[in-house]
Image (spheres, rainbow, N blue to C red):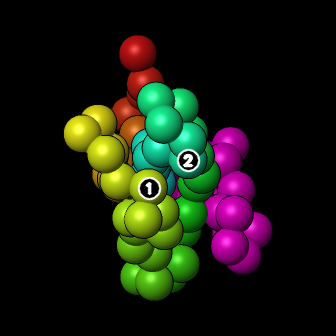
Amino acid sequence: MSETTFTCEGCDDDAVFWVYERWSEEAGMATEHEYPLCEECIDSVGPQNLDGAYANYLFKIDTVAEAFGMTTL
C-alpha cells in the first residue's frame, strides 16, 4: 500500500478507512462525525450513537482511495 496523507485518529499510523456516522442529538438536528482509521484500529470500531438513531441515521466505513493507489474524484 502507498502512504496516505491521512493519519489514523486512534494511533497516528497511516489511515486506510474513513468512518462516518450521522445521528440526531435534538429533534430535527443532525450531527455528523467522520474520522480516518488504520487497519488495526478499524477492528474495534462500531456505531457510537445508536441512541440518536432516526430515519436518516447512517453508519458506514469506506476505504481511503489513496491508500490503495487510487484517487478520489
Percent coordinates x, y for residue 62 in the rendering: 35, 48
Kindly identify the amino acid type of the residue bearing the numbered disc 1. Answer: Gly
CB-based contact (under 8 Å), mark 1 and mark 2: yes
Label 1 sits on a secondary structure element that is helix
For this orientation, the residue located farthest to the left is 55
What residue sits 41% from the left and 82% below the top?
Answer: 43
Apparent side of residue 65 relative to residue 15 in the rendered image (left or right): left
Q: Quadrant of the N terminus?
A: bottom left
Question: Which x, y percent locates residue 10?
Answer: 68, 73
Q: Main secondary structure of the magenta part?
A: loop
Magenta residue check for 10: yes
- The span picked out in magenta is 1-18
User: Which numbered disc covers residue 43?
Assistant: none
Residue 24 part of the magenta-drawn span: no
Q: How many marks?
A: 2
Q: Is residue 47 left or right of residue 31?
A: left
Place of residue 58 in the rendered image (x, y in percent of width and height, measured from the top left)? 32, 46
Q: State the residue at coordinates (45%, 84%).
A: 44
Residue that numbered label 1 is attached to: 52
Q: Position of residue 66 (x, y in %)?
A: 48, 40
What residue is rendered at 53% in x and 31% in y? 29
- Tell me, yes or no, if residue 32 can be seen here: no
The residue that label 2 is drawn on is 25
